[in-house]
Structures are given as C-alpha cells and as structure tokens.
Image (spheres, grey):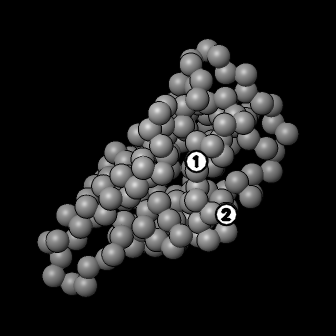
Amino acid sequence: MGFPITAYLSMIMKRLKKLTSRLTQSSTEAKPKSLYDIIGGEGVTRQLCETFYDVMENDPNAAELLAIHQEDMSLTRQKFFEFMSGWLGGPQLFVEKYGHPRLRARHLHVAIDDTMVTQWLYCMQRALKQTLPERQHQELIWSNIQPLAWHMKNQDSGSSDSQSRG
C-alpha cells in the first residue's frame, strides 16, 4: 500500500511501451505507436469498455461489483473509456478532462476487497475475450491490468461495507 500510484502507473506505461515495441518490431510496414493503435484505436477501445460494463450489468458473477455502482452508468462508462484510451497509449482524454487519474484515491470512497477485484477482473477478462480477436493482444492487456486492479484493493476480504446503488 506504500507504493505511490504515480510511480506505479509510470512503471506500467513503460512496460506497455516496451511490450508494444516488441509486437511491432517484426512488421515492415509503418509501426503503430501504441497498443491503442495495435488493437484498433478508438472504436475497439470504446467497444472493450462498453463490453466490460455490459458484462458487469448482466452477469450474476459480477453482482456485488454492480451493486457499488450508480444506477445510471453512462458517465462511468465514458470515464472508463477516457481512462483506457490513455492507459493503452492513445489520446489522454481522462487526463485532459480531470487531471492525473489517481485511481486509488478516486476510489477510496468504495470498499474494494478481494471479491471486488476478482469480479472486476472477471468482467475485464470476459470483455477482452469478446472484443479482441488476437489472443496475444488479450494477454498483453491482461498481464498489465491485473496488477493495476489488485493495487486498487483497499480492504481486507470480508470487511467490505459496500455502498448500495444510488
């Protein structure tokens, strides 16, 4: 819990750039500049984010995670797309609108325990599989988003006093 989020996000972004570079080295064509470009840019990133929330809203395996969200998730969906756009190396839409993500600080009002993280990762894994046809792309995002998700944990298991839907 003592690892600063800015250092953590910086480390993840460097890792993503390095891995993206490896993916594009074999290509003789113009090299995409980011994972955002490699997976299909804005359209695919938006679809990934929409699918993530569709899974959360419709899959009973994510019921507790859904319960901590507001009834109308249109703004949440949009903010997630804006964050993921920048996280994947595309336009820094979230930063331009709201400043540094400070993800952990922005989520401290919500009790996030093992169950919440596991359900969030469940939704993301399903969204990746449904949205990205290339397994290599799925695995690249998955391997980098898991540590970020676990970094969001702010409660021990069983101590979650989750907010009800508002």
Picture coordinates of residue 74 (x, y %)? 74, 57
Tag shown at residue 103 = 1
Count all numbered tags in the image, as a single digit.
2
Image point 14% across, 72% down: which residue?
Answer: 26
Picture coordinates of residue 137 (x, y %)? 33, 57
Depth check: 85 or 121 in front?
Answer: 85
- In the displayed structure, would residue 155 be above or below residue 30? above
Depth check: 66 or 89 in front?
Answer: 89
Going by the image, does 78 lie left or right of 135? right
- In the displayed structure, would residue 96 be above or below residue 125? below
- Reading the image, the residue beneath label 2 is 98
Tag shown at residue 150 = none
* Gap between marks 2 and 1 measured at Cα: 12 Å
Query: Element at badge 2?
Result: helix
Type of the residue with mark 2: Tyr
Query: Element at badge 1?
Result: helix
Type of the residue with mark 1: Leu
Q: Residue furthest top?
A: 158
Which quadrant, please, contains the C terminus? top right
Image quadrant in which you'd find residue 75: bottom right
- In the displayed structure, would residue 106 be above or below residue 44? above
Image point 58% across, 55% down: which residue?
Answer: 101
